[in-house]
Amino acid sequence: MIREWRKQRKDLIKAEKSKKNLHSCAPKWPKLEEYVKNWIIDHRMNGIAVSTKIILIEARKLATEMSITDFAGTTSWRERFGRRKGLVCVLKLQ
């Protein structure tokens, strides 16, 4: 662990002191995540509601189209994806 800190020394010195920095992992499927993010943004801009289940269904569909065989599309992936991309799911109450 200390070895990793030494490798990241310059980044840690520059990092903001009040935030948790350097905690996120790089996505395993960056192209897939970019497509899903753009899909979500397009739907939201058109006024179409996007639920967490719909996000998972679309991500799985895109993964098969992109020939990604090791993508499971779990809820934990969706939560991490949302955190990485800064996406928030909002529940509408009527």
Image (cartoon, helix red, strand yellow):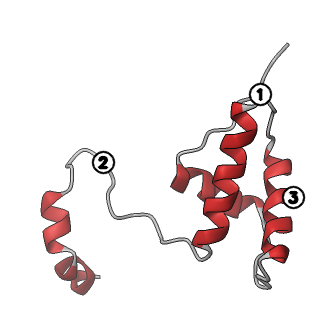
SS label for mark 3:
helix
Disc 3 and disc 1 in contact, CB within 8 angstroms: no
**Residue 6 position (above or below residue 10):** below
For marks 3 and 1 on the same chain, the one whose residue lies earlier in the sequence: 1
Q: Type of residue at label 1?
A: Gly
Crowdedness near tag 3: few (<14), some (14–19) or many (≥20) residues, C-alpha within 10 Å:
some
Crowdedness near tag 2: few (<14), some (14–19) or many (≥20) residues, C-alpha within 10 Å:
few
Q: Check disc 3 and report the residue beneath it.
A: 57
Residue at image location 77% in from the left, 27% down from the top:
47
Crowdedness near tag 1: few (<14), some (14–19) or many (≥20) residues, C-alpha within 10 Å:
few
For marks 1 and 2 on the same chain, the one whose residue lies earlier in the sequence: 2
Q: Check disc 1 and report the residue beneath it.
A: 47
Q: Quadrant of the C terminus?
A: top right
SS label for mark 2:
loop
Inter-mark Cα distance, 3 to 2: 33 Å
For marks 3 and 2 on the same chain, the one whose residue lies earlier in the sequence: 2
